[in-house]
Image (cartoon, grey):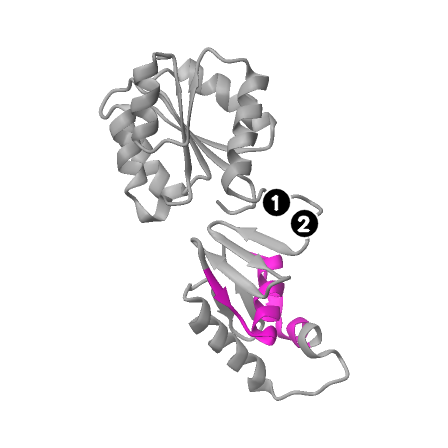
Amino acid sequence: MKNNKIRILLVDDERDILEFISYNLTKEGYEVYTAENGKEAIKQAIKIQPHLILLDVMMPEIDGIDTCISLKSKPELSETIIAFLSARGEDYSQITGLEAGADDYITKPIRPKVLISKVKSLLRRKIDIPTQSDKSRIYIKDVIIDKENLIMIHKGEKISIPRKEFDVLYLLASKKNKVVRREELYNYLWGEQIIVGERTLDVHIRRLRKRIGINNIKTIKGVGYMYEA
């Protein structure tokens, strides 16, 4: 969760299946987490807030259907895509899975290349997958910082930000988990030739913190600021 990778949670009570699918998804650059039952899946999902959950139907503790219903009821997982990945291919199983709120129902066994294709298709339906060429947006956990529109999207909520405050946010977020010195912020915001009061930057930071409503911008006393992700 400390980087921009797409997070996928795999839920299955068979460890060999978890290992096999994890290996293939990791090779594609995804950040993969696993759970062996529904109870553990719910706990993991709340913690990591995955972009996609691949969920088996027949599991101990809580079956896949009830797990899906529970996951869909969590506000923090409202943007998470859920797909069943199950050996049960009967029509009624698929209908029950979709009625529980799943976005798709995939039957196994399935070839790795086909599964990867399915995963990419599911992700394209609901989220913008960041690419190296996408310089206008920064993706951090459940936050999207959109430079073109001067907005931050936090858990689906759009927050408009005035230009100077947005520039502060954008620079800090582009160097997340690294200290940005005050001098660098001054030069980025106003240029080397323009002199502004020392407290001007502090006022922008204070307003920005209040506006975005999340406590990610940390003061590094005597040095500068850091966007902690």
Q: Which residues are magenta?
A: 158-186
Q: Secondary structure at mark 2?
A: loop
Residue 30: image location, x then y, percent: 55, 33
Q: Are marks 1 and 2 in contact (CB under 8 Å)?
A: yes
Which residue is located at x 71 percent, y 75 percent? 187
Question: Which residue has dot 2 on it?
Answer: 134
- Left or right: residue 124 versus residue 98 is right
Residue 120 visible in the displayed image: yes
Q: Nearer the viewer, residue 66 or 210?
A: 66
Task: Give the residue type at disc 2.
Answer: Asp
In x, y percent, where is residue 149? Answer: 60, 63
What amino acid type should be assigned to the residue bearing mark 1? Pro
Residue 56, magenta (yes or no): no
Q: Which residue is mark 1?
A: 130
Vertical placement of 114 versus 139: above or below? above
Which element type, helix, strand or loop, lies under badge 1?
Answer: loop
For this orientation, the residue located farthest to the right is 193
Q: Is residue 119 left or right of residue 215?
A: right
At x 49%, y 72%, the residue is 208
Residue 102 falls in image quadrant: top left
User: Can you say whether 17 is above or below 121 in the image?
Assistant: above
Who's the residue at 51% across and 68% down the image?
160
Q: Is residue 103 above or below residue 224?
A: above
Question: Which corner quadrant of the image does residue 178 belong to?
Answer: bottom right
**Where does residue 105 sit, x and y in percent of width and height?**
41, 23
Q: Residue at x 55, y 68 (%)?
A: 225
Q: What is the number of the mark on residue 99? A: none
